[in-house]
Amino acid sequence: MKRKQCLIALAVCTPLLIANQPTIASELGARAEPRVKKIDIRTASEEDRYFLVFCARDDTATSKSMTGHAFLVLGKDDHAAKLSSQIAFGLYPEKSGAVEMVKSRLGPVPGKFLDEVMNGSLTATTYRLIVEVNSAQYRDAMHIRDQWAKRGEYRLLERDCVSFIESVAKKVGLKTPERKRFDALPEQFVAEMMRINR
C-alpha cells in the first residue's frame, strides 16, 4: 500500500517540481497521459504567455449529466509579476435536469456561465487541449464568452457547452470536428480536436 501511495504522490508532485516556476500549462496539463495535448499557435513572441485550454469531463459516473461537459480555461503567465492566473467558464442551462435538456433540444432555454474553478471541474477533466496563444487571441476568447453570456441562451447542439468551445476554437484558428450527431459529446469533441490540431 505504501508503494501505491508513493507512486500517486510522485505522479501529482513531479510536474510541479520539474518547472523552475509553475505555469498554467504545467498546472493544467503536464501529466504524462495521452488525454492531454499541448500545442503552440502563437504568431509572435510576447513577454507574457497566454493559454486557452479546451477541457472535457465525463459526468455520467456521478449522474451530473448524461452527456458530460466541455468548458474553457483561460490562463495567463504574467512575466513581470511572476504570477499565473486562470479563469474557467462553461455554459449550462439555467435549470438542470432531464426535462430541461429535452426542452433545450426543442428550442432555446435560459442559459448561464458557471465558474468551473469554483465548480471543481479542473480536477475532473478527462481531456485537455492546451493551446498557447497570443494576447489578441486570448482577448478574442474573452469577447466570445461575453457575447454568449449577454445572450443568455442554451440550446442543445446549437448553443451548448460544446458549441461555445467550438466558437472559440474557430475564432483562434483551430480545426474543429463536424458536429451533426448526438455522438459528438464533449469528450469525443475535445478528443477529436486534439487529434486534428498539431
Image (tube, rainbow, N blue to C red):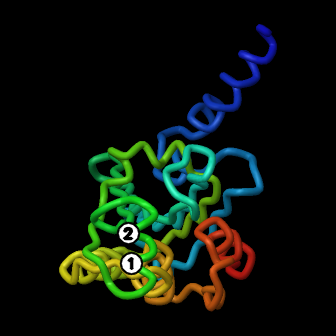
Q: What amino acid is found at the position of numbered circle 2 in the picture? A: Glu
Quarter residue 82 falls in: top left
Q: Is residue 51 visible?
A: no
Question: Are dots 2 and 1 in contact, CB under 8 Å?
Answer: yes
Could you tell me which secondary element the residue under label 2 belongs to?
Answer: helix
Tell me which residue sits at (68%, 77%) in the image: 183
**Left or right side of 186 for 192:** right
Depth check: give the residue in front, 2 or 26.
2
Q: What amino acid is found at the position of numbered circle 1 in the picture? A: Lys
**Left or right side of 101 for 8:** right
Question: Where is the N terminus found, in terms of image quarters?
Answer: top right
**Mark 1 sits on what residue?**
103
Tell me which residue sits at (41%, 67%) in the image: 99
**Mark 2 sits on what residue?**
100
Q: Is residue 121 visible?
A: yes
**Left or right side of 23 for 143:** left
